[in-house]
Image: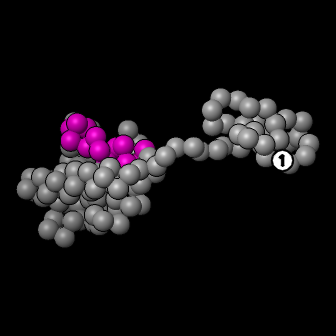
Amino acid sequence: MSDYVYGDKFGGDKIGRDKNVQTGGSGSTFRIDNSPGVSPAELDAAVGELRAFVAQLAREGVVAADGSVTDAGAVVTAVRTRPERLRALARAVAGGASDGVLAAVQGGVATLVTALVGGM
């Protein structure tokens, strides 16, 4: 099979909007992601939400002043029981902006919360 790109097809059968499967060869799957990503405003909202959440956890004594986790179990419980507080963060992580969020909000708890939100 020749390797050619024509429109939104990659040398094989079109399947769905973002997935193409090569036919007649090794059966390789190619993923084409046409998602628009995360806007700067959405990223700002996610960062603000994460900072507010970390501050709340610090007031509760679950996080030290330097952002390190003192009680990982309590952080996990807080994320799972209060998902409404992390909607913008969840959208940003789903849109592929977890690195951008973590660049703005550093610390062990930020990494933990972002990972937990990404796995929800």
Residue lying at 43% horizontally and 44% vertically, measured from the top left: 94
User: Would residue 61 appear left or right of 19 to someone viewing this image?
Assistant: left
Q: Any magenta on residue 89?
A: yes
Where is 66 relative to 77, above or below?
Answer: below
Q: Residue at x 14, y 57 (%)?
A: 55
Outermost residue on the left side: it is 59
Secondary structure mainly formed by the magenta segment: helix
Q: Quadrant of residue 71?
A: bottom left
Q: Amino acid at mark 1?
A: Tyr
Q: Secondary structure at mark 1?
A: loop
Q: Is residue 67 left or right of residue 33?
A: left
Give the quarter of the image for residue 104: bottom left
Residue 84 appears at what percent x and percent y?
22, 36
- 5, above or below 71, in the image: above
Q: Position of residue 20 (x, y in %)?
A: 72, 37
Residue 39 appears at what percent x and percent y?
38, 51
Q: Nearer the viewer, residue 23 or 56?
A: 23
Q: Is residue 37 above or below residue 70?
A: above
Q: Residue under label 1, please give it.
A: 4
Q: Nearer the viewer, residue 43 or 72?
A: 43
- Which stretch is magenta? 82-94
**Residue toward you, 99 or 63:** 99
Task: Report the side of 37 relative to 9 (left or right).
Answer: left
Query: Is there any visible trace of residue 29 in the rendered image?
Result: no
Q: How many labels sit on residues?
A: 1
- Quarter of the image that includes the N terminus: top right
Identify the residue at the far bottom of this view: 66
Determine if the magenta segment contains residue 74: no
Q: Is residue 20 visible?
A: yes
Can you give x and y, in whole percent of width and height, for residue 41 in the image?
A: 30, 52
Picture residue at 28% right of the left edge, 64% below the top: 105
Q: Quadrant of the C terminus?
A: top left
